Image: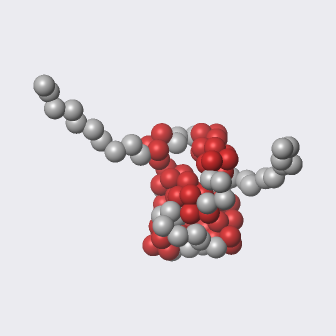
Amino acid sequence: MSKITTTPYDVAEHLRTPEEMAAYFEACLEEANGDAAFIAKALGDIARAKGMSQVARDAGLSRESLYKALSGERSPSFDTILKVIGALGLKLHAEARHN
């Protein structure tokens, strides 16, 4: 039997356009179920796709603090989330939920 080699999947490698990034973030928002760390991790994926250094500059954060905030291991402040969303060129919106 031959040996199968696998490599880790990195979603950041597949987020190439602003539309793909927005669609990914929208899907993550729907799946997050109130988990702020999950949303932060999704933003981290998008930031890696765009270039972490540039996103950090645009958000007014250090690269290291951006990595920590978007690692998915903790929930960053809402202020940080808003800065990152703006730096990524995304827009947060709300709509009425129909149960």
Percent x, y of residue 84: 62, 63
Rendering quarter of residue 6:
top left
Q: Position of residue 29 (x, y in %)?
A: 66, 51
**Which of 76 and 13 lies nearest the eye of the viewer?**
76
- Residue 74 visible here: yes
Q: How is the image coloured?
A: secondary structure
Q: Residue at x 22, y 36 (%)?
A: 5
- At x 60%, y 43%, the residue is 24
Q: What residue is shown at x 59% (from left), y 39% (from top)?
A: 20
Judge whether 1 appears above or below 61 on screen.
above
For the image, the number of numbered tags is: 0
| Residue furthest top in the image | 1
Looking at the rendering, in which quadrant would you find the C terminus?
A: top right
Q: Residue furthest front?
A: 99
Rendered position, 10 above or below 38: above
- Quarter assignment of residue 23: top right
Q: Where's residue 61, x and y in %?
A: 56, 73
Would residue 18 be visible to someone looking at this image?
Answer: no
Which quarter of the figure is the N terminus placed in? top left
Name the foreground residue: 54 vs 20. Answer: 20
| Position of residue 79 measured from the top left corner of the image (x, y, whole percent) | 68, 72
For the point 52% across and 40% down, the residue is 16
Q: Residue 7 appears in which quarter of the rendering?
A: top left
- Residue 68, above or below 38: below
